[in-house]
Image (cartoon, grey):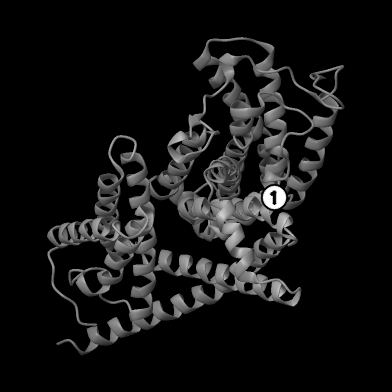
Amino acid sequence: MTRVRMAGPVGTLVLALLGACAAAVLDLGLLAPAALALSVAAVAATTPFTTTEGTARDADPPPFRIMAAVLAGLTGVVVGLLTATVADLGLIEPVSYALGAFVGCGAAPLMYRRTATSLALSLAAVALAVVLALAVTSVVLLITGIDPLFAYTEMLDYGSSPDSVVQIVNNGTTLYLSAVAVAIGFKMKLFNIGVDGQYRLAALLAAAVGGAWALPPVLHQFVIVAVAVAVGGFWAGIAGYLKVARGVSEVISTIMLNSIATAVTAYLLSTDRLAVEIGTNNVGTPEIPDSGWVPGIPAGFLGADGEIFGLVLLAAAVGAGYWTVLNRTRFGFDLRATGQSPEAARASGVNVNRMVLTSMVLSGMVAGLVGMPQLLGESHYYALDFPTGLGFTGIAIALLGRNHPVGIAAAAAFWVFLDRSAQILDFQGIPKEMAVVTQATMVLTVVVVYEVVHRWGRRYEQQQVGAELGRAEVTP
């Protein structure tokens, strides 16, 4: 592939300036977000030809470079739109979106140079699974006599409205925490199916403690969250202990613990114990005083009337901490090594049993946070109508996001988008279960497609190693 030599920082700055100018010109005839997205996409499309020679992408074949360029473009668009949204709070729209285009066009080449081939392959597998799922859904719609394009257009219009965006962020926050809890176990080759029971029991006891006393604001919130984390970690730790002490499969033990958690919750959620009457045919814990609430983020900048859960920031911190611990600490290395090969990890001095128990406890601690955005941001008590089933949905999202915090965030957003946008289909005479078909097909295909792409990538790496060895042998 013929490329233009450009100095890294200087070339990136030139591309960013060109992208900002292009966005400003396109803004004259297009909506500002569309102008930004087109300019960033154009810059990303040029990265395989303008990237400085000698980067890690040099040895990659054209398909891998294309995947890296697509990933760089998507990242640049997201970064640019976020920058423009924040800048728009204090600047006029043309300036804020030109600034967003500048940042996004600068992020795209950087992402292209830094993207690992394995990450590009994983995201390509997910993208292909999404395309296949939409294709299957389209076939089902056509068989039932419904125009797929009309259905998708209605879903996109409703799902992208300001109020829907706020709902997607709020619901996505809880599912993101659930998926991260599952992903921690997956990294250790542990299947923590018990997230559902862990977060429900944690939310109940945290709500009971929070509603029993009135404490100073920050202390009150901390106590509620700490109780939830402790309960979730303890409940998951039972399964971890059973595995290391008695060899009980975590799949069996967590399923049983889910049932026990349901029974304990039903027993405690009674007016004779922790609950009080709430409305008609509903009971719940006493309402948490105002000092225990977490204020929401006004969504007026999006044009919505609601608020974004304040604990969305906690979810972001959990994702960042998950990635940092996993990839930048000795504990994370031991965890991944134990998951890949327990025998090799044991031979290198890692206490495998301790890693299993610790991983399950950490997974449960994150699971304990799943109900906190809803509890402290909206409900303020635990009742019979508290959201359930989030743990099982988190398993699907963790699989779809390939256990990567960014992938999990994208998968959670897309999953909730389908749930939210499907609500408009009933008004158009279209079964909203079409969204469920897409979700189910997506989860099934991503596993198969990822394995195919993974084998392709492994074969390519073996070919690269063989080629390098061959060149080394002929070099005098």
Q: Residues within 10 Å of mark 1 (few under 14, many from 20)?
A: some
Residue underneath mark 1: 392
> Among all residues in the image, which is located at the extreme front?
29
Q: Quadrant of the N terminus?
A: bottom left
- The residue at 65%/61% (across/down) is 439
Query: Residue 4's x, y, as percent?
Result: 15, 75
Q: Is residue 447 visible?
A: no
Query: Residue 139's x, y, as percent?
Result: 68, 76
Query: Residue 372's x, y, as percent?
Result: 60, 31
- The residue at 54%/24% (across/down) is 294
Q: Quadrant of residue 13?
A: bottom left
Question: Quick one: SS at disc 1?
Answer: helix
Describe residue 388's horizontal placement relative to residue 112 as left or right.
Answer: right
- The residue at 60%/22% (across/down) is 224
Describe residue 18's horizontal placement relative to residue 242 as left or right.
Answer: left
Describe residue 147's horizontal placement relative to residue 161 as left or right.
Answer: right
